Amino acid sequence: MLAKTPPMGFNTWNTFGEDINEQVIRETADKMVELGLRDAGYEYLVIDDCWSKRERDPVTGKIVPDETKFPNGMKAVSDYVHSKGLKFGMYSCDGVMTCARYPASFDHEFLDAQTFAEYGVDFLKYDNCYRPRTADQVLLYRRMSNALKACGREILFSACNWGDVEVEKWARSAGIHMYRSTGDINDSFASIRDIALSQVEKINYSGTGCFNDMDMLVVGMYNNGNVSAGGCTDIEYKTHFALWCMFSCPLMLGGDLRKLDGFCLDLVKNKTLIRIDQDEEGRPPFVPNDPGNRNTPTFVKVLSDNQYAVLFTNFKDDRRAGELYFETIGLPVASGYGLHMVDAFTGEDIGVKKEYMRLELEPHDCAMYICTLEK
């Protein structure tokens, strides 16, 4: 089954944009293995927009890889990625052109799906630019879904329509495995915060087989790359990664892996946070105390094995308190039970808390715990 848990991997767009080539892909594949990212679960290496020539082949009608960027052809790149024990992903769009104005798949869906299968593609990111005004967007995504099913190869279908036309309500029925529910992320805390808050009321549509995609991670970019917008601090990247894990989002790395520092590498390889993201039940979190709180929301997620994850956040620019009243998660004091809490970042066991939990958080910081019921 594809997307039994949220897909994990790397996408070229956030760092490289149009500046992609065979060497970058090979070096990234090498780093995914060398840094232990493949073994941590990051299995897809996805080439985003700008990989092709500006025109289709006049004889075959196929999209043609840019010979300057990919002199050995896309099959050779795919074979190299596969040789590293990774899976290979590519990009197209439901319009006449991609977002960067390269050939896209409108009315070529079955030919393009077959071409991707010939390359050995395992993942298709499918964007939503330059779609004819008269074309039905939902139908176009169903078209490509059918084309992928007919191509003879198992390919994960990643829909990137930015949350348009209530995608969360129809993505699953269209055969989509992950769906973009937001506009594009950039490397700033404001972008991270606004994206997360925009999904609180929609997250219940996400689950096993079809996951809400809040866009690629910007962890480790530090204002370098294609979506630079001021950059983030380590604390802000920590909160970013915790939110995406709590929301069961696909974890698609976007920072340059060749330059990833020790803090960010340890963060994205944190086994406890990945376990929260990859929990086999795929349940969404909820906001127990005050769903309208946009300053210091607390999120609770029911996990398998009778566990819970609790995430306290501070989206404000000053020090604030995070709170959780256990009554609001169905754990009244009269039950005699509390939560045995272990810090998800450090592994510190802080013991059993009863009735409520309150802690001080620095600006843009978070605290996250794995919890079990205990008297």
Image (cartoon, rainbow, N blue to C red):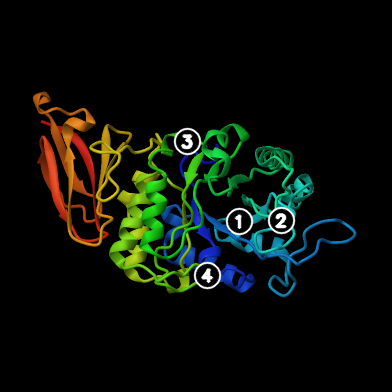
Q: Residues within 10 Å of mark 4 (few under 14, many from 20)?
A: some
Label of residue 88 in the image: 1
Q: Alpha-carbon distance for marks 1 and 3? A: 22 Å
Front of the two marks 3 and 4? 4
Q: Residues within 10 Å of mark 1 (few under 14, many from 20)?
A: many
Q: Earlier in the sequence, mark 1 or mark 3?
A: 1
Give the structural element (helix, strand or loop) at label 2: helix
The residue at which mark 4 appears reads as: 226
Give the structural element (helix, strand or loop) at label 3: loop
Q: Alpha-carbon distance for marks 1 and 2? A: 9 Å
The residue at which mark 3 appears reads as: 208
Q: Earlier in the sequence, mark 1 or mark 2?
A: 1
Placement of the N terminus among the 4 image quadrants:
top right
Q: Position of residue 324 (x, y in %)?
A: 18, 40
In the image, what residue type sits under mark 2?
A: Tyr
Front of the two marks 2 and 3? 3
